[in-house]
Image (tube, rainbow, N blue to C red):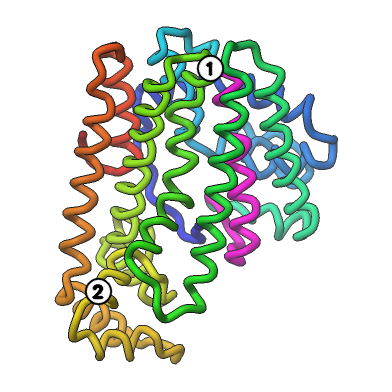
Amino acid sequence: MATTTTTPTRRLSAALDTGRAMLEPALRDAIQRRLSPDMAQIARYHLGWTDSEGRPTGSWGGKLVRPTLALLSARAANGTAAGGVPAAVAVEMVHNFSLLHDDIMDGDETRRDRATAWTVFGVPQAILAGDALVTAAMSVLLDAEGAGVRSASRSLMTATQRMISGQADDVAFERRDDVTLAECLRMAGDKTGALLGCACSLGADLAGADPALVERLAAFGEHVGLAFQLVDDLLGIWGDPDRTGKQVGADVRARKKSLPVVVALNAPHTDELSARYLDPAPLSERDVQRIADLVERAGGRDWAEQEATRQVAAAEECLAAPEIADAVRSEFLEVAGFIVGRRF
């Protein structure tokens, strides 16, 4: 989901810097040509290119992680990064469709230290801008040159549907007291892993690569997505505010059904945790600390740390295929390390 806090700036990796240089002109062109003027204005504002009046800011709001992965996947299939540009643009459009809608659903009023689009242009217009982006993403892919246009288009739509399903489950979990670990893992895989998996394979898919390679690249991205979610969930409870930009125990205050919490709630002898976490009454600082301690005692923290390590190892294994060039493999791992916040 979107966040209203400001995360301290991390240095972009070399691969992300390269991806930004190649993708920004193509994405600007797609926004200009494929969206109506009103929708394009909102998209440009949301992306950080302009202020609310449409005046250029000379800045960029996003890191272009997903499109950079799409470019790498084209290279993994022995193609060129340029050949993966349509896949990269499409992935970034879908990602920003989700952010526009997430900000509305979460009621977030700021993103990257700016007012969110819905607070500036209104909820209906921001929803429509998100809709315009996701439909434009499909037109970008369908107009691309590549042996796998149809397969890539189907893959992106499947990933988008999974992402929406995961978001719907996450919202539904807020109203439930009986969420299982299997349900929570599936939700995280859909909400966070689906689009990352698609990004890691879409360039290769568009190029008509061997389905086995496309599948391995997609699996790599899904494992990275789950590792990211686990690390994010850990930071949401035990993270250092100076590093995360979040208040200590932010996810506990929001009573999120995050993975460590769901593990703990499903452990035996956790009546006190259940009573405290499922009670809608406001939490004091002492309550937040007590709940965090109870989650840790029930094994939620250890499980999440171990599972994140397992997902990282599984991601690395997906790239062991000999047909993936060493340089491409290294860049995939570099970007994945940036996403997860740890070395691969």
- Say what amino acid the circle numbered 2 marks: Ala
Name the amino acid type tagged 1.
Gly
The tag on residue 84 is 1
State the extent of the magenta-drawn residues as a range. Answer: 85-112
Residue drawn at x 68%, y 39% is 134
Name the quarter where the C terminus is drawn: top left
Residue that mark 2 sits on: 264
Q: Main secondary structure of the magenta part?
A: helix
Q: Give the image location of residue 82, x and y in percent.
A: 53, 11
Residue drawn at 17 percent across, 76 percent down = 298
Precedes in sequence: disc 2 or disc 1: 1
The quarter holding residue 10 reads top left
> Relative to the observer, which residue lies in front, 228 or 197?
197
Callout 2 secondary element: helix
Q: Is residue 176 above or below residue 242?
A: below
Marks 2/1: CA–CA distance: 43 Å
Q: Is residue 57 magenta?
A: no
Locate residue 281: give its quadrant.
Answer: bottom left
